[in-house]
Amino acid sequence: TELNKIRNFSIVAHIDHGKSTLADRLIQETGTVKDRDMQEQMLDSMDIERERGITIKANTVRIDYKADDGENYVLNLIDTPGHVDFAYEVSRSMRAVEGSLLVVDSSQGVEAQTLANVYHAMDADHEIVSILNKIDLPASDCDRVAEQIEDVIGLDATDAIQVSAKTGQGIHETLEAIVKKLPAPKGERNAPLKAMLVDSWYDAYLGVIVLVRIIDGVLKKGERIKMLSNGSVHHVDRIGVFKPQREEIDELGPGEIGFLTASIKQVRDTRVGDTITHEKKGTEDALPGFKPAQPVVFCGLFPVDSAEFEDLRDAIDKLALNDASFSFEMETSAALGFGFRCGFLGLLHLEVIRDRIEREYDIELITTAPSVIYHIHMKDGTMQELHNPADMPDLTFVDHMQEPRIKATILVPDEYLGDVLKLCQDRRGIQEDLTYAGTRAMVVYDLPLNEVVFDFYDRLKSVTKGYASFDYQMMGYRQDFLVKMSILVNDEPVDALSTMVHRDRAEMRGRAMVEKLKDLIPRHMFKIPIQAAIGGKVIARETLSAMRKDVTAKCYGGDATRKKKLLEKQKAGKKKMRQFGKVDIPQEAFISALKMD
Ligand code: GDP
Ligand code: MG
């Protein structure tokens, strides 16, 4: 395809503002997918994404469009993830396109992720077309939202397009704007091949599929290519595009976006942002490098049934094949046995992986407290990264500790501002900025990541009845007075419940935890002390009193089948518990005990 007939773009939006629905309409309006094959959210392929309405992996679709000027255009849409955990994936896929559609729900207005995502687009020097979506809703207020786009983002919104992705209104205008307002890609057909590795994923039939954007030159089937990052050479056995189904073609030229397969075994052998060229007569000029996404949240995953350890290993291996940002290593816990210490981009990422293991592989899991990476500066001048509170070195050798901080941006209606400030303050936040955009306040806080990873987002949603939006950026490390808090049940430390906390908050957290555990652990035939301790010092304590009767006692002798049923239920329940010394702790306790109210 000629360069001036190509338009490459992405759609940026806050979650639920209609990105996927708009993509569906563009695909449908252009006849890319026949009406009878149309299903909702064509691009959100994984079940879990569809259910939660989020996009995790970047997806792409090639749309053929005959414009009003009579010319045939090729429009390549890269769909980007909308959640803060995947900010890195957003920024990298933006580098593969020249323009963006900024979608804002005209009944809601600009939100935190609208800002975060549009800034990624601006960083990538995109031309941006504003779309006011959901104009069919009675609460839609296009003038107000257009003004907000100008005030808050600083984009000219005078010719923002009014759209209903639901009814199809404004879709034709959107397609015309893509052709007229977004720039065509630049590139040199006769130059040595230079392609950007945009994304890659594992396919059971084809092996690793690599999504590429051709910058210069032409890539053909059967050629030998080289990855500039490590010099590895591969034979290209397929080239194609997504419409959105895979369709094989013979070559990709400058400005085009498509896929290749080359018998690559693991996603880990492909580096996003890498430069792909020909083995012979290739370019030596690499694209500006991308740094790989680093996991920031770690937790242990253990099978409830320890016999399922090998199945869990298998599941984790398979998931990691397709997700280079998910890391893991084996871990043994005195309490939980064999499992894995896993690293994630954020809490949503953690949840997605955990759900997939439980659902797709049918393995019940115990998840230990999520932890961030601490920097432990030792007295001998060395520094250790701490991924797991259980590995905390002896304090006599420790000089000081540092924890990661984030810059959080929160947009919230006026009336909830007080609650949001209180929440941030309670989580050791330092306010950096407070401004207004209409009746919405925008607050910026410097917060410790460890106060955010567990339940900050849930709390924020609940104190603002769902009206706040939130986004964050990692900001680096700062020293603080942190300690390891251990939990002892029946005088035995439960390593999976150890957490790092700020010294000033330890008593409060410890108290809350032992109180929760007292409710969560069932009574036994004996008395059970539950304690929180720092080093050898107990800072909070509860006692679970002994049980008097066994459960079947209330069945007044007679009914044997009922007795049997109860005992079976008990047995099934037991399987979900873990024994600590003589005490059974139910699985929910590990997560619930850590939630702060
Ligand atoms: P995404 O998270 O940005 O991908 O948003 P979705 O496309 O999944 O849309 C979120 C919700 O808004 C879904 O329930 C859609 O059906 C709905 N929606 C999207 N566009 C419109 C629209 O133009 N009008 C109305 N009324 N609802 C819409
Ligand atoms: Mg979506």
Image (cartoon, helix red, strand yellow):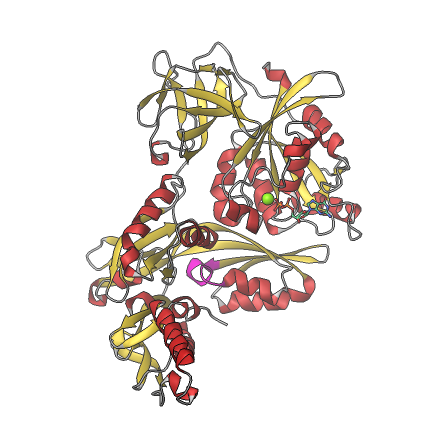
Q: Quadrant of residue 479?
A: bottom left
Does residue 385 appear anywhere in the picture?
no
Q: Is residue 451 magenta?
A: yes
Looking at the image, residue 188 sits to the left or right of residue 34; the answer is left
Locate residue 356, reporting x and y percent.
43, 50
Horizontal placement of 199 versus 571: left or right?
A: right
Residues 156 and 490: in front is 490
Image location of residue 419, percent across then percent down: 60, 68
Among the 4 quarters of the image, the one containing residue 18: top right
Q: Report the magenta residues as a range.
A: 447-455
The relative height of residue 495 versus residue 132 in the rendered view (above or below) is below
Q: Is residue 538 left or right of residue 285?
A: left
Q: Quadrant of the N terminus?
A: top right
Vertical order, 17 against 203 (above or below) = below
Residue 5: in magenta span: no
x then y, percent, for residue 20: 62, 41
Q: Position of residue 11 (x, y in %)?
A: 61, 37
Q: Residue furthest top?
A: 190
**Which of the two residues, 148 or 99, is positioned nearer the viewer here?**
99
Relative to 15, 405 lies left or right:
left
Residue lying at 41% horizontally and 75% vertically, measured from the top left = 565
Is residue 267 shown to the viewer in this render?
yes
Q: Residue 527 is drawn in which quadrant?
A: bottom left
Pick whichever, 112 or 580, lies toward us: 580
Question: Does residue 146 lie above or below 456 as drawn?
Answer: above
